[in-house]
Image (cartoon, helix red, strand yellow):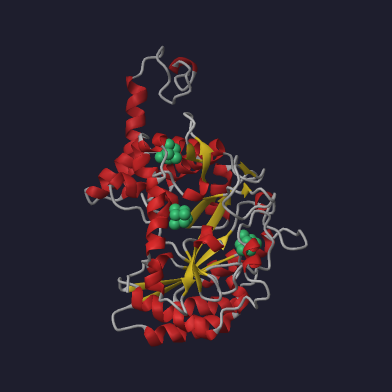
Amino acid sequence: MTEVRAAHVLAKPTGAICNLDCAYCFYLRKEDLYPGSTFRMDEGTLDAYLRQLVEAEPSPEVTVAWQGGEPTLMGVDFYRRAAEIGRRYLPPGKTIRWTMQTNGTRLDDEWCDLFLEHGYLVGLSLDGPRVMHDAYRVDGAGRGSFDRVMRAARLLSRRGVDTNVLTTVHRANGDHGLEVYRFLRDEVGARYLQLVPIVERVGPDGRTGSQVGEHVTDRSVLPEQWGRFLVEVFDEWVAHDVGEVFVLLFDWTLAAWLGVESPACIFRPTCGDALALEHNGDVYSCDHFVEPDHLLGNLAAIPLGDLAGSARQRAFGAHKESSLPRCCRACDVRFACHGECPKNRFVTTPDGEPGLNYLCAGFRTFFHHVDEPMRVMADLVKHGRPAAEVTAVLARREAARYARASRNEPCPCGSGRKLKHCHGL
Ligand code: SF4
Ligand code: SF4
Ligand code: SF4
């Protein structure tokens, strides 16, 4: 049996079922794949999944990642049972790292008891201040979920549950990177942040939720907007918060400058080890490709490790690299970007080739912008020094640039104005 990088299996015990109805949700539509289903993972599937995952995971830590839909709809007892089953299959020397991505609206003290008892890392979806969050994160009646999510954030914080805030970046918050970041850092107290761009393609049937179509909805973040958002957040982070706040996308970026494999599939040359498990045991190539064409099989018939190592899945993974357009192959930040996620590659390159990433302009801006600080951080890390020293190094370099510049030269801040009319005033 092939080993599976278990950290990248996203398990959906309720399938696409959720108590919210976020306007940009790409997953709700997957309900159509299972007409008549109860959308509840049964004990047999749960047992087979955990056993196969533990067997296939080569490293001492097995990660079980629950996602949805909304996984809390299964109820706390399902996860208590999962912990019992997981313990039964765990050989000596291995541990399970439990994680759950939730919209937070159903969390209470009983959930926190479960999270604390089993050391869960909880991902909480929150898109920024009320008006930005409620722009799209609504329930079936169209009511915003901000108050319910903030209540969950306070509860998780008060109870000391490890929490990672997942913020999607879209048209409604995309021009407010700094405001969103400061809100999450200062008002929510978030220390771990994941930023995910919303790119919703509109298919020929006028619907979203599948990877077809060349146009995007007006909720989707614009490419340049995405770049500006990242730059704003990065500048604030690198000036104040390195070592205190962890923005996953920045960690993944640093991996590229360190010359090590990215922890994230989107920035690796190939993909193929980020499987999705539906409630009935069906395994798909990726969370973003839960579609009939990408169904690998069901783990009741074929073990998870074999599905992960199947020729079809290897071909899916290799296609990311083999389908790169020429402009990506020649790109100076290819080592960091690798054309990002294939689901976003649906625009035409300047020389007319298909398959360029819709977000290219944003990623290009971001990677160029962070080049100097990333070089400094990589150098610090390689010399066994804390990356947080980057803030002082950059401040010293900045001061030296101003000291060297004469009043009639362009201002080192990059405004294009003379120093004497800008920061030299
Ligand atoms: S909470 Fe998540 S799964 Fe539920 S509708 Fe919103 S984006 Fe979709
Ligand atoms: S398609 Fe995108 S999300 Fe899926 S494994 Fe590849 S890079 Fe990751
Ligand atoms: S920045 Fe653009 S051109 Fe460069 S690798 Fe990424 S998607 Fe391709």
Q: Position of residue 33 (x, y in %)?
A: 62, 67
Above/below status of 322 relative to 116: above
The answer, for residue 414, to whether it is visible in the render is yes
Extreme residue in the top direction: 408
| Image point (37%, 56%), residue name | 263
In this view of the protein, which residue sits in the foreground, 81 or 305? 305
Residue 348 falls left or right of residue 410? right
Extreme residue in the left direction: 383
| Image point (64%, 72%), residue name | 106
Residue 59 falls left or right of residue 319? left
Asked which quadrant contains residue 110, the reply is bottom right
Residue 327 falls left or right of residue 227? left
Q: Where is residue 90 in the image (x, y as percent from the top left)?
A: 36, 83
In this view of the protein, which residue sits in the foreground, 387 or 266? 266
Asked which quadrant contains residue 140, the reply is bottom right
Q: Where is residue 159 in the image (x, y as percent from the top left)?
A: 53, 72
